[in-house]
Amino acid sequence: MFTRRLGCLLLGFFCCHSAFGEHLRLVTADDYAPFTGRALPAGGMLTQVVHAALAQVNLDSTLDWQPWNRGYLKTLRGEYDATFPYVHTLQREQEYFYSAPLLVVEQHIFSRADDPIERVDAQIMQGRSVCSPLGWQPPSVIQDLLDQGVLRRHSPIGIKECARLVLIGRDDFFVADRRLGDAALQLVGATPAQMRSSNSMISTSSLHLIVPLNHPRGASIIDSFDAGLASLRASGEYQQVLAGYIESRAQMTSGN
């Protein structure tokens, strides 16, 4: 364990001082609770994971907050070194390196309790509107129905807006990780009598830190970050970060 940790620290040291300079410039988006958000403890669950992984390999960083699409494009143009958290898509694979998974998420359908949608079915979803924030990639089963013209897509700026728009009937449903969707419903004050999530998941996906393929040190950044993330998991600190976030969030909620 000591040898592995020492190797990770040495890798981080050389990457940091010879490749990255003083720090990494990171960007993420707001209102993606519980994963990222300025109002969340330490910027959200995955913001904490990213910072903890970088700390494992002694990499300093700064973090900016931008809307999803803007942060993505600015990173691609070189204004930031990396952005997170993103799911894997074929289009992004042509533009970005992917880190090891920050977290594996299970996607559920969130719909109104008086018009529940339990599964992905072309007949059930014909002519309906799915709310998927700008910059998000819908699960493939939903994207297929969009491509076929079965579904219509509405893309506001964030998941909180999707929860509100489904609640008031502007859209029919949105798809999100159970934790993310529940947090969005809480933010808009939706009760179980008004909104519900599907009992079964419709897909699984993983969230990643991504670095542009055209970044001169992109592969090195990913290698160093993955070493830090692996060290975080091996030491048991990864689970401690997640548990600590959940506890901090519970304390924040109970204090409101």
Image (cartoon, rainbow, N blue to C red):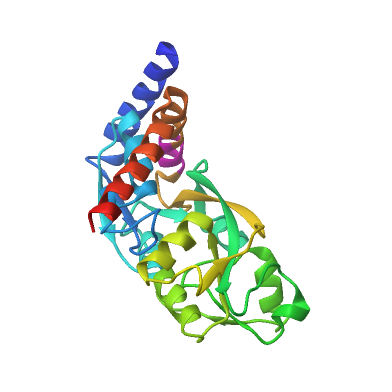
| Left or right of residue 150: residue 209 | left
Residue lying farthest to the right in this orientation: 123
Nearer-the-camera pick, 169 or 209: 169
Q: Image point 23% across, 59% down: which residue? A: 256
State the quadrant of the N terminus.
Answer: top left
Nearer-the-camera pick, 189 or 219: 189
Q: Is 32 drawn above or below residue 10 in the view shown?
A: below
Per the picture, the main secondary structure of the magenta-coloured stretch is helix
Find residue 160 and report its image quarter. Answer: bottom left
How many labels sit on residues? 0
Nearer-the-camera pick, 103 or 26: 103
Residue lying farthest to the front in this orientation: 193
Which stretch appears magenta? 219-225
| Left or right of residue 9: residue 102 | right
**Is 199 within the magenta?**
no
Q: Image point 66% across, 78% down: which residue? A: 146
**Residue 217 locus on image (x, y percent):** 40, 43
Find residue 218 and report its image quarter. Answer: top left
Q: Image point 38% across, 32% down: which residue? A: 240
**Residue 131 locus on image (x, y percent):** 53, 76
Find residue 142 and report its image quarter. Answer: bottom right
**Residue 201 locus on image (x, y percent):** 65, 57
Q: Is 129 drawn above or below residue 19 in the view shown?
A: below
**Residue 79 locus on image (x, y percent):** 30, 60
Nearer-the-camera pick, 148 or 253: 253
Q: Image point 45% across, 70% down: which residue? A: 191
